[in-house]
Image (cartoon, rainbow, N blue to C red):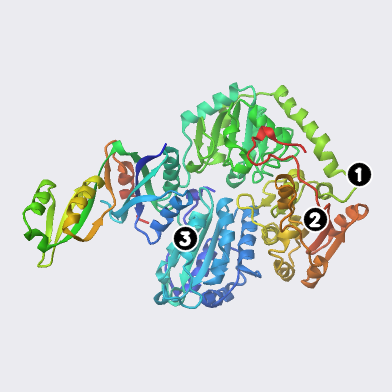
């Protein structure tokens, strides 16, 4: 049975490593639903958060093959209920839209949407939450005209364990390679 | 194998030199004596540096870069050393892909060094530029592009460490031309650890105890071994285990020669064209102990019907192999040699005469229905099996057999006898036609004192036939055997059995192999008649230099037994 999983990978910060990791998904014909990568708390270590929909057997094998790549420090996977996650969405709407009644203002208040920037021509809004949350806001803003929209991949933190804890301590001791 | 135990070899002071010379210095520090390669624009500085190292490092100019990779593989497989390849950018680099894929799936240590356009030209569609890093991502254990000369010593040390530690595999290092020309202060230190690479784990003590209990209490225990035994040098430990426990052992084609073929507990070959008893009894054993093998689909047949009754113990160095195909009841993740050494004291002395008798009974059936007429035919055209059988008689199993892919490969693996380890080289996982001729060259150069025989079909021979010239030029005394049935035999066999004899693009109108071979400088013998076969084999094997023997064999002979696609191993057919 297919399920949603979040894969968390810690790697060296090296050119091409993203490609090496994604080929493992390609080989097994697994589609990446979302992918976020940025520097982790350790110098030179990157953290990937990848969400996929597949069978557990597949994600388990995938994680092992991700783990064994030279440059991977750790790879784990989590079920939906084992993680807390968020996605961020940015919306660019026309400033004029705010001058036609209070409807837009009410939407922003009820969703606790942040206003990031106000310019004469446009306003940039930020919404953090699950995909459903940002999607609901998208639908509500749509009638007002959305000039541009972007949604990030998932960032997630596990409920069940502290990933990378052991490794972190030993890595800090080891010579950086 | 355990590179971490190696002493660090470092040069104390630094020397000023260019990147190309630094590459040669790295190779010398890694003990490289032999390189296969092909020069071109982007790697010319390295070839220029090589000129000064000719008395330390031999370079063999193959006739195609693919040939260089397979030669390096053949060399690596018989020596356990890392094979080294040079190629230029663009087409030189893309021609390495098949060899890299083959080396990855068959866990062969190899370091390929490719030239690349100047760093400032990267991504501009420069002459002979190709993104070799992206192209080879899926077929290498590791790859890296060097754009600055100062990176060379560290990256090269890492390349050699990664290629030949843990589960070995191919590495490609792409070096831009400016990095070959720039100066650096050279100092070399061998890599002994990388923080994001864990090549060898230690098998869990509890799992080891569980494995011993299962094996000691089993009524019908069964060992399957693969190349992991050879790669870790665990041949002695395997033999000790088999002899102490009295457990019959069968092999995958990459495991072949890790145990003498005439050992009474060596019960033969697994898989699609393996022996009858080892396949049938896979589904009767109560404990199945897999040592250094990965349950390839050609070994398991239908996975759902593979040894469902057995408790499975799986020993492999690669944790991602555990539960990949067959669920393991006991998982031993570790080096085969070290793990078997720890397991041995826990194993009780035992014998299993009734269980062994089951193998012998089925062996007799296979002998009567298949083997006898294959290796000792009385009439009809020459069979592939009888050629291999006669070679066994001549060499008494003291040979290295290198095979290509197809019917001849299955026949050679089934019937070749092996008295020594590291003596079987074949393209197992990838099934690369054209592998054997260059791999045979590499194997012979790696084992100059041994009788090395490359067994090749008439189809595969024409894929890398140009390496005959390399063999002639290097005067490598390889013995080349062409088993010519004028068909792509294995495909034809499948078309006969499963596609209603609709022979689609499998018949070959071959050139005159005798003329080609002679023309390229390799003497050739042609055998068409059974009457002259033995004498021709003797003449061929006794020839001092390289020699080719072409044997015309039955055109439409099939390889049996056979596990049909989609069938379980127990459903193996004898005809």
Q: Which mark is residue B485?
A: 2
Alpha carbon separation for disc pair 1 and 3: 54 Å
Q: Residue A148 in the image: state x and y as whole percent.
A: 22, 61
Disc 1 and disc 3 in contact, CB within 8 angstroms = no
Residue B11 appears in the figure? no
* Residue visible at 57% across and 73% down in the picture: B50
Q: Position of residue B308 (x, y in %)?
A: 58, 29
In the depicted view, which residue is nearer to us: B192 or A120? A120
Q: Quadrant of residue B371?
A: top right
> Viewer-nearest of labels 2 and 1?
2
Residue B297: x and y, percent? 60, 42
Few, some or many C-alpha atoms within 10 Å of disc 2 (few <14, some 14-19, many ≥20)? many
Question: If you read the primary sequence from the N terminus, does the residue marked by circle 3 or circle 2 appear first?
Answer: 3
Q: CA distance from mark 3 to mark 2?
A: 41 Å
Chain to which the residue tagged by mark 3 belongs: B
Circle 1: is it few (<14), some (14-19), or many (20+) Cα within 10 Å?
few
Of B202 and B415, the residue lying toward us: B415
Q: Which mark is residue B143?
A: 3
Q: Is residue A125 left or right of residue B505?
A: left
Q: Is residue B37 above or below residue A64?
A: below
Residue nearest the viewer, comparing B282 with B237:
B282
Pointer 1 chain: B
The local secondary structure at tag 3 comes to strand
Camera-side residue: A140 or A11? A140
Q: Is residue B515 left or right of residue B338?
A: right
N-term mark: 1 or 3: 3
Foreground label between 3 and 2: 2
Residue tagged 1 = B378
């Amino acid at each position: 049975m297919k399920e949603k999983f979040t894969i968390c990978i810690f790697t060296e910060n090296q050119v091409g490593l993203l490609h090496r990791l994604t080929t493992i998904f390609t080989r097994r014909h697994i589609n990446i639903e979302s992918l976020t990568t940025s520097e982790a708390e350790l110098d030179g270590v990157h953290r990937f958060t990848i969400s996929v929909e597949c069978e557990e057997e597949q994600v388990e094998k995938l994680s092992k093959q991700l783990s064994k790549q030279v440059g991977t420090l750790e790879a784990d996977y989590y079920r939906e209920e084992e993680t807390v996650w968020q996605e961020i969405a940015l919306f660019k709407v026309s400033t004029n839209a705010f001058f036609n009644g209070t409807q837009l203002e009410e939407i922003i208040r009820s969703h606790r949407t942040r206003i990031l920037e106000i310019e004469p021509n446009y306003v940039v809004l930020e919404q953090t939450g699950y995909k459903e949350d940002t999607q609901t806001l998208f639908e509500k803003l749509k009638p007002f005209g959305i000039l541009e929209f972007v949604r990030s991949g998932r960032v997630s933190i596990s409920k069940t364990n502290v990933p990378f804890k052991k490794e972190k301590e030993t890595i800090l001791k080891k010579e950086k390679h | 194998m355990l590179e971490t135990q190696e002493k660090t070899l470092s040069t104390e002071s630094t020397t000023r030199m260019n990147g190309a010379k630094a590459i040669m210095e790295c190779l010398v520090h890694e003990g490289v004596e032999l390189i296969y390669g092909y020069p071109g624009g982007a790697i010319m500085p390295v070839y220029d540096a090589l000129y000064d190292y000719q008395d330390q490092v031999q370079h063999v100019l193959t006739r195609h870069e693919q040939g260089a990779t397979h030669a390096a593989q053949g060399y690596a497989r018989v020596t356990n050393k890392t094979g080294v390849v040079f190629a230029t950018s663009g087409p030189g680099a893309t021609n390495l892909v098949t060899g890299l894929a083959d080396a990855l799936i068959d866990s062969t240590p190899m370091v390929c060094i490719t030239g690349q356009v100047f760093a400032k030209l990267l991504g501009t569609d420069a002459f002979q530029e190709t993104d070799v890093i992206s192209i080879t991502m899926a077929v290498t254990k590791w790859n890296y592009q060097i754009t600055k000369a100062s990176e060379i010593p560290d990256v090269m040390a890492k390349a050699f460490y990664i290629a030949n530690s843990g589960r070995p595999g191919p590495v490609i290092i792409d070096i831009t031309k400016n990095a070959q020309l720039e100066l650096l202060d050279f100092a070399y230190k061998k890599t002994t650890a990388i923080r994001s690479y864990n090549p060898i784990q230690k098998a869990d003590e509890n799992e080891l105890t569980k494995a011993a209990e299962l094996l000691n209490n089993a009524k019908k225990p069964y060992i399957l071994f693969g190349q992991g035994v050879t790669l870790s040098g665990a041949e002695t430990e395997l033999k000790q285990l088999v002899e102490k426990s009295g457990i019959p052992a069968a092999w995958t084609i990459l495991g072949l020669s890790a145990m003498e073929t005439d050992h009474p507990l060596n019960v033969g070959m697994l898989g699609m064209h393996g022996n009858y008893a080892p396949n049938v009894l896979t589904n009767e054993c109560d404990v199945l102990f897999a040592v250094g093998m990965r349950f390839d689909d050609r070994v398991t047949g239908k996975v759902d019907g593979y040894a469902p009754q057995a408790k499975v113990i799986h020993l492999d160095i690669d944790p991602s192999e555990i539960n990949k195909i067959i669920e393991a009841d006991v998982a031993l993740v570790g080096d085969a040699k070290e793990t078997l050494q720890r397991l041995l004291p826990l194993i009780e002395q035992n014998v299993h005469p009734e269980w062994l008798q089951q193998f012998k009974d089925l062996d007799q059936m296979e002998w009567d229905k298949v083997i006898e007429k294959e290796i000792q035919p009385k009439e009809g055209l020459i069979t592939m099996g009888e050629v291999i059988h006669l070679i066994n008689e001549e060499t008494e199993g003291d040979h290295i057999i290198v095979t290509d892919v197809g019917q001849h490969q299955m026949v050679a693996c089934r019937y070749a006898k092996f008295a020594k380890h590291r003596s079987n080289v074949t393209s197992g996982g990838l099934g690369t036609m054209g592998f054997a001729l260059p791999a045979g060259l590499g194997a012979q150069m790696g084992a100059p004192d041994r009788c090395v025989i490359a067994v090749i079909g008439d189809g595969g021979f024409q894929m890398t036939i140009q390496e005959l010239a390399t063999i002639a030029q290097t005067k490598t005394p390889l013995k080349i055997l062409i088993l010519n049935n004028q068909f792509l035999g294995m495909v034809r066999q499948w078309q006969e059995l499963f596609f209603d004899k609709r022979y689609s693009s499998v018949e070959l109108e071959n050139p005159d192999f005798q003329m080609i071979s002679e023309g390229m400088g390799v003497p050739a013998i042609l055998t068409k008649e059974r009457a002259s076969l033995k004498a021709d084999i003797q003449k061929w094997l006794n020839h001092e230099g390289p020699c080719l023997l072409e044997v015309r064999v039955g055109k439409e002979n099939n390889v049996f037994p056979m596990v049909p696609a989609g069938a379980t191993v127990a459903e193996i057919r004898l005809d």
